[in-house]
Image: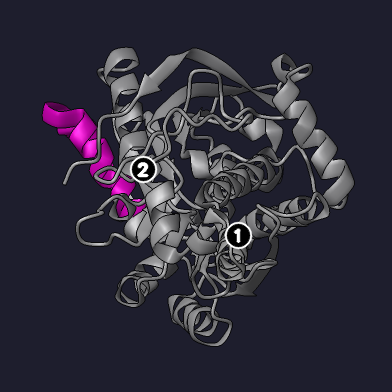
């Protein structure tokens, strides 16, 4: 072989050795490097919905766990979380800060319907994932109009339809009173209930809405009691849900009390309301309640307990919101793992919209996450439960809700 041929062969070997598919295929969006992924978050650490702040605190702890184990595909998570006090103008301010100043890859698990509604157009115009929104509003499942917004919670509409099915079967002659928050959160529940009741809407004898700025909802409960209703559908956020449970007892009203799943936390709602006042309250659930005796030896619950002890010891493992934050963080971690070295905003949404039979260990048996490019609803199944003594008890089978009405 000639000297020239040897040089050519050596050059070829160097070229081939220097080329690897992984290096060639690396694609990074804003906030991503070989060693880090910046994730934004907005939570109500203060204000009327501060009980939900535990979601972000648990998520922060979970990402610390991930980082201690080497990160995701070798990249550590930098979790940047700001308080919006459950105030939409503040949510807008914090979203702009995260996107334009912090330059995060995405905003994960922003909490609440009003604030997220206020930033939805902005996030989509900037083409930044508004991913796994901690709200069950149906507006997060509209991939044609808002392809960058995806919720996590089951839709409020779907959950309300489950309650309608239950009442039509178990209490077909009921007189229904409804307490709901006067925003997209409460109105979605109201809409779903009426869709579920279909030709039986005459069962509704009273409706009362409240503003989150109100100090109490006592006067609304008094009005609803006066309607003669024997069923109360309590579509409220935690603080007001607890007030409603307590006030119904104080005024001697004993309706069949149905509570939205967003407000069934024992620590944030039931304890403040009083265990004795919450007996036989009904709600829906899709996560394992860590305090239920039936999960004592469950591997998923044991892993959750170990996580809480090691990374969030100041937190309360009995708070279902802690289990929710933990599960949502696991879902984002799965999406980022699937991104590999294509950690772009486009690929994040593509992977999030391709979860099939994904079952984080804190989901109830038989309930899985399934998404597609045309259906962003992550969870569409529930079980019902009833509060007895000092805990919730499951009853019935897994129930599927119909897709949200458009």
Residue 368 versus residue 115: which sits nearer the camera? 368
Left or right of residue 266, residue 245 in this image: left
Quadrant placement of the N terminus = bottom right
Q: Where is residue 151 in the image (x, y as percent from the top left)?
A: 41, 51
Q: Where is residue 181 in the image (x, y as percent from the top left)?
A: 39, 56
- Which residue position is annotated with label 2? 155
What secondary structure is the stretch in magenta mostly built from? helix
Look at 53% across and 84% down and name the residue there. Answer: 97
Taking the image as shown, residue 293 lies to the left or right of residue 285, namely: right
What's the residue at 29%, 22% (across, down)? 165
Q: Which of marks 2 and 1 is nearer the N terminus?
A: 1
Instruction: Residue at 35% x, 42% y: name it.
Output: 377
Q: Residues within 10 Å of mark 2 (few under 14, many from 20)?
A: many
**Is 354 within the magenta?**
no
The structure residue drawn at horizontal position 81% and vertical position 43%, both measured from the top left corner, is 308
Give the magenta-colored segment's residue range: 186-207
Left/right placement of residue 378 relative to residue 325 reads left
Q: Would residue 180 be seen by someone viewing this image from the given angle?
A: no
Asked whether 171 or 18 is in front, the reply is: 18
Q: Distance between the residues labelled 2 and 1?
A: 57 Å
- Dot 1: element: helix
Residue 16 on image: x %, y %? 56, 59
Res. 13 mark: 1
């Amino acid at each position: 072989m000639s000297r020239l041929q040897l040089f050519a062969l050596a050059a070829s070997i160097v070229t081939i050795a220097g080329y690897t598919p992984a290096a060639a295929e690396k694609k990074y969006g804003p906030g991503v490097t070989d060693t880090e992924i910046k994730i934004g978050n907005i939570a109500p650490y203060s204000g009327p919905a501060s009980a939900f702040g535990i979601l972000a605190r648990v998520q922060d702890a979970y990402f610390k766990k991930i980082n201690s184990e080497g990160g995701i595909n070798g990249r550590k998570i930098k979790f940047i979380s700001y308080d919006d006090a459950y105030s939409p103008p503040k949510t807008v301010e914090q979203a702009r800060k995260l996107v334009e100043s912090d330059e995060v890859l995405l905003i994960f698990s922003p909490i609440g319907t009003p604030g997220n509604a206020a930033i939805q157009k902005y996030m989509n115009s900037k083409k930044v994932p508004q991913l796994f929104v901690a709200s069950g509003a149906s507006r997060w499942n509209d991939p044609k109009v808002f392809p960058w917004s995806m919720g996590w919670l089951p839709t409020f509409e779907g959950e309300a339809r489950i309650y309608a099915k239950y009442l039509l079967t178990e209490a077909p002659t009921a007189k229904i009173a409804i307490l709901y928050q006067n925003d997209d959160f409460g109105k979605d529940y109201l809409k779903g209930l009426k869709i579920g009741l279909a030709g039986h809407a005459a069962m509704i004898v009273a409706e009362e809405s409240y503003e989150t700025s109100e100090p109490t909802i006592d006067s609304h409960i008094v009005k609803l009691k006066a309607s003669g209703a024997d069923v109360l559908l309590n579509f409220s956020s935690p603080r007001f849900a607890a007030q409603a449970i307590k006030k119904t007892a104080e005024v001697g009203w004993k309706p069949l009390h149905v509570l939205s799943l967003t407000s069934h936390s024992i620590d944030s709602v039931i304890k403040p309301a009083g265990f004795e006042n919450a007996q036989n309250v009904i709600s829906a659930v899709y996560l394992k309640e860590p305090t239920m005796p039936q999960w004592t030896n469950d591997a998923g619950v044991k892993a959750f307990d170990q996580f809480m002890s090691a990374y969030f010891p100041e937190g309360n493992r009995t708070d279902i919101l802690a289990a929710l934050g933990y599960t949502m963080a696991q879902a984002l971690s799965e999406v980022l793992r699937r991104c590999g070295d294509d950690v772009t905003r486009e690929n994040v949404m593509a992977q999030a919209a391709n979860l099939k039979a994904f079952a984080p260990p804190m989901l109830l048996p038989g309930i899985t996450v399934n998404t597609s490019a045309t259906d962003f609803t992550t969870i569409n199944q529930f079980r019902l439960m009833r509060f007895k003594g000092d805990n919730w008890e499951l009853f019935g089978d897994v129930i599927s809700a119909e897709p949200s009405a458009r």
